[in-house]
Image (spheres, rainbow, N blue to C red):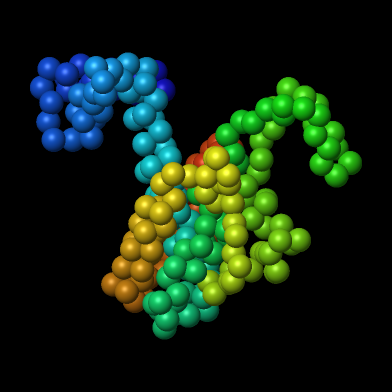
Amino acid sequence: MRAFTDYLRALFEEKHEESKDDLISALVLAEQAGDTLSEDELLGMVFLLLVAGHETTVNLISNGTLALLRHPEQLQTLRDNPSLIKPAVEELLRYDGPVETSTERFAREDVAIGETVIPRGEMVLVVIAAADRDPRRFPDPDALDIARVNNKHLAFGKGIHHCLGAPLARMEGQIAIGTLLSRMQNLRLKVSPEALAWRPGMVLRGLQSLPVEF
């Protein structure tokens, strides 16, 4: 993190001196009513764009592709009916989404959930992946069903914390997975599922790599 921050600080300075037609130059030069972004604000924005705008979508595409490869009947259904790509991406988001837990939340008052009381001020981590497999909400939750209806998952959060980039992420997932399946008719895993390695961490859920052949 320190190395990346140092890299970005040097990059901001470079863009100040010689801007180009790129996003960081636009952020460095952005101005409204005489106000510009501070260096800390620039760092926060770039981190947000990289993690929330890029890595999550990478995980959606790779996790979703793996889920389809591990469920060949669902993969074939999608090949036979490409129009199912929208509900398919929603199901892939629910089944093995790119975000495992929410960022930290703190209880503003004592909250009772079942038989457990969360005291005021305590930190809470909401496990989105578990909520999206809740049998009280989703029939047969551990099954992958690309034609699932009423699929109100929490992969993009909810309420004021709903992901601003959700429409773009959905479009990217639909285009990437749909194109991949149409161009590579014999796509298959190159290794056993048990040999795949997942990135460490509690918030994001993604593979270190997805070896395939076709």
Vertical position of residue 64 compared to residue 73: above or below:
above
Residue 197 visible here: no
Q: Give residue 42's quadrant in the image.
A: top left
Residue 85 lies, in percent from the top left, at 42, 70
117 with respect to 160 (left or right): right
Residue 73, percent across and down? 52, 79
Point out the image quarter for the N terminus: top left
- Residue 23 locus on image (x, y percent): 23, 35
Instruction: Measuring from the top left, give residue 154's x and y in whole percent.
Output: 59, 51
Q: In the rendered image of this protein, does residue 8 appear above or below residue 211?
A: above
Q: Identify which residue, 64 or 192, lies in the foreground.
A: 64
In the image, residue 60 above or below residue 151: above
The image quadrant where one finds the C terminus is bottom left
Q: Nearer the viewer, residue 210 or 142?
A: 142
Q: Is residue 74 left or right of residue 140?
A: left
Q: Is residue 110 left or right of residue 123?
A: right
Is residue 44 visible in this depiction of the protein?
yes
The residue nearer to you, when weighing 167 against 175, is: 167
> Which residue is at 83% across, 37% downward?
112
